[in-house]
Image (cartoon, helix red, strand yellow):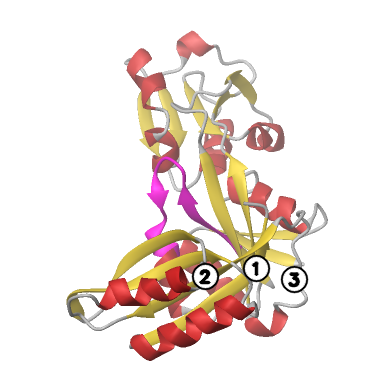
Amino acid sequence: MKVAYQGEAGAFSETAARRLLGPEMTGVPCHSFDEMFAAVGAGEADCCIAPIENSLAGSIHRNYDLLLDSDLTISGETSMRIVHNLIAPPDVALDHVRRVYSHPVAIAQCTRFFAKNPHIEAMPVHDTAGGVRLIMERGRKDEAGIASAAAAEIYGGRVLLENIEDNAQNFTRFFLLTPPERAQDVVPRETTRRWKTSIIFRVANKPGALFRALGAFAIFEIDLSKIESRPIEGRPWEYAFYLDFIGKLDDANVVRALDNLRELAEMLRVLGSYPTRW
C-alpha cells in the first residue's frame, strides 16, 4: 500500500499512516498538501493521510479545501498525541544551540521554550522531520530541530529535550483519504469504537436557513461533533459548512436526517462515513 503524506520520513503524518495502515505500508513523502492530493489523483499513491485539525491550532483549512476539490472519500481517521522534541547532532550541547528549525506550526506550539531561551532563533521550514534532516546534513554545532523522536532515530540525531510543547493536550486528527473505488480495500487497523460521517452543504443566504438545516439533526437526535465554515469561491461573504456527526451513513436516523437536509440545502455532499475511536 502506497500512502502519500506531507513531509519527510519521520513526519508525524507518517507515524499516523503507520498507525492506521500498519508498518508494512510504503510512504510517499510530498513537499506540500497539494502534491499529496495530486499523488493520489495521478495513481502514484493508493491513498493519503491528511491532518485536518489540531487541538491547539485549530483546523487545517487547506486540507478542507483540497478535500472539497477532489473526489477522495474519508475512509478512516486517527488522533495522535503530538510530542515535540529538541533534536541535534550527537556532539551538540544544549547551551551551544542558537538556531532551531521546524515547521511554523510546531514552532508556534513551543512558544514557552523560545521565551525561556531568547538567545535561540526559530527558523521555519516546510516540515518538522525535514528540519532535523537539514541540521544533520549541515552538521553545525549551534543548530537543532523540533520534531518527533522517530525523526531523531531516522536521521541519527540526539534528543536534547523532550516534551517542549506548551501544552500536553496537543493532539492532531488525521483523515485517511482514498479514491471512492478503493474505499473498501483500504481498511484502518485501529479498533472501532463508533462510526462518524462527514458532509459538506450549502444553504440559501437568508435568515434561519442554517438553523433549519441543523435542526434536521436535532430532530433525529444525532450528535454533531464538529462544524466548520469555509468561504464559497465567487460568492463573497457566503459559506459552505463542513459537518461531522456520530452515526453511520445507512443508520435509519441518519438517512432521514440527510433526506430532510437535502430538501433545505442548495448542495449536499457526503465526504465519508468511517470508523473511529473518538
Residue under label 1, please give it.
Answer: 274
Give the spatial CA distance, label 3 vs label 2.
Answer: 18 Å
Which three-letter amino acid code belongs to the residue tagged 1? Answer: Tyr
Q: Is residue 33 left or right of residue 150?
A: left
Q: Is residue 97 left or right of residue 206?
A: right
Q: Quadrant of the N terminus?
A: bottom right
Q: Please report contact status of discs 3 and 1: CB closer than 8 Å, yes or no.
A: no
Query: In percent of the image, x 49 and y 65: which residue is there?
Result: 244
> Does 52 lie within the magenta span?
yes
Q: Position of residue 91 (x, y in %)?
A: 62, 15
Label total for image: 3
Instruction: Place residue 117 in its image quadrant.
Output: top left
How crowded pointer 3 is (Cα within 10 Å; few <14, some 14-19, many 20+) is rated as some
Can residue 53 be seen in this snapshot?
yes
Up/down of 138 relative to 113, above or below? below
Q: Which residues are magenta?
A: 49-63
Q: Nearer the viewer, mark 3 or mark 1?
A: 1
Up/down of 115 relative to 259, above or below? above
Residue under label 3, please give it.
Answer: 186
Query: In percent of the image, x 51 and y 61: which residue is there?
Result: 223
Query: In percent of the image, x 24 and y 84: which residue is there?
Result: 204
Looking at the rendered structure, the secondary structure element under dot 2 is: strand
Depth check, front residue: 221 or 187:
221
**Lower position in the chain sequence, tag 3 or tag 1:** 3
Q: Please report contact status of discs 2 and 1: CB closer than 8 Å, yes or no.
A: yes
Residue under label 2, please give it.
Answer: 198
Looking at the rendered structure, the secondary structure element under dot 1 is: strand
